[in-house]
Image (tube, rainbow, N blue to C red):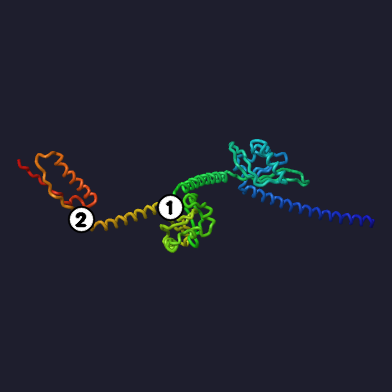
Amino acid sequence: MEQTKETIDELRQKIGALETERQQAEQAALEANAALRETQRCLTRLIESSPDAIISTDKQGNVVLFSEGAETLLGYRAKEVTSRNISVLYGDEAGPKQIAREMRKRGGSVSCFESVLLAKDGSNIPVLISASVLSDDKGEEAGTIGFVRDLRERKREEEERDERATELKAGRDRFQYLLTVTPGVVYTTQASGDYACTSVSENLDAVMGFSPWEMIEESGFWVSRLHPDDAPRILPEIESLIRQGGGTTEYRLLNRDRNYIWIRDTFRVIRDDRGRPLEIVGSWSDISYQSRQSRRLESAWQSSMICKRSSLPAQRSYTPPRRPRMALRVGSSVRAWNRPLAICRGRCATIQSSGPSMSTLRMPRVCLMKSSV
């Protein structure tokens, strides 16, 4: 009897321990279920609040999750696509097969993969897909989950940006063409120091014989080519014009042929937010021909003035010669009448071309004498 009693007590103790373990297991299960439900609620809130479309499939490729973002993006209700194959959202089977192939190639996930989905209204929607393979406890593939982002707005921005880039390129090409055909050299330089060039038009070669890169890369290009007689005047003048905001000046520059050409330099100063000189934008014009013509005209004018001053006293002191009186007989031949008049006209023309005007000369008088019968 005592042995039976001990056995019963031992069994009671085991039953009590088992009951305790059961209660603990139940409590753990309840806590796990609560945690699972909380996780599910969090996951549901995350899915519902995500601006991206979230779509999940089983291992056969049938849709098991279709978020509100997916409904907004594609126009389907969740019940319309749930349990249907994912290919309905691509329009064919090539789309999902391509995604599955990319996931396998990259170790079970793909990120930022561009594709196109078919909306309920039949429109094509460019999307960016990030997807992963879901595995069960045994490590076998159980399905997929993907996050889909709408690219329509970005595509529109890209198209607008491409259009602006195309217009900008066309404008730049037109501007470069104008810079090429214009006779002036357009440039930009620093506003201090040795006025290093930052950009220059292609027609620099036509004006000075240098390539644009030579002017940009060579330090002190402009200063080193100023005419020695012009440099002491030009450098202070440029500084003064920079303080004024720009202006025009003329000087000589040495070209590639080691000849000096006259340049008319017109520029404007670009300032920063604080008003300090930042950059100079200007143009060079080759005025060598105009300068030569101007010097020739000035020399000719000076020569004419010297000649005029030297000829004035001679005009005042000039006295025409007196002609002797000539007697002609009435009835003589016409030739006898015309000979002295022709001589007179010839001499008067000679005097007129070399001396003062005819108004200052006294014409010789011709006396006609009647001959006696």
Q: Measure the C-alpha gap from mark 1 to mark 2.
A: 50 Å
Q: Is residue 232 visible?
A: yes
Residue at image position (64%, 36%) is 91
Residue at image position (34%, 53%) is 297
The one of 107 and 35 positioned closer to us in this rendering? 107
Q: Residue furthest front?
A: 373
Q: Nearer the viewer, mark 1 or mark 2?
A: 2
Q: Position of residue 342 (x, y in %)?
A: 18, 43
Picture quadrant where residue 303 is located: bottom left
Q: Secondary structure at mark 1?
A: strand
- Which quarter of the figure is the N terminus placed in? bottom right
In the rendered structure, the answer to whether residue 192 lies left or right of residue 63 reads left
Q: Is residue 278 visible?
A: no
Q: Position of residue 253 (x, y in %)?
A: 46, 57
Residue 194, relative to residue 81: is it above or below? below
Name the N-terminal-most of marks 1 and 2: 1
The residue identified by callout 2 is 318
The amino acid pointed to by label 1 is: Asp
Residue 120, relative to residue 365: is it above or below? above
Q: Position of residue 31 (x, y in %)?
A: 74, 53
Residue 176, relative to residue 268: is it above or below? above
The residue identified by callout 1 is 286
The amino acid pointed to by label 2 is: Tyr
In the rendered structure, the answer to whether residue 241 lies left or right of residue 302 reads right
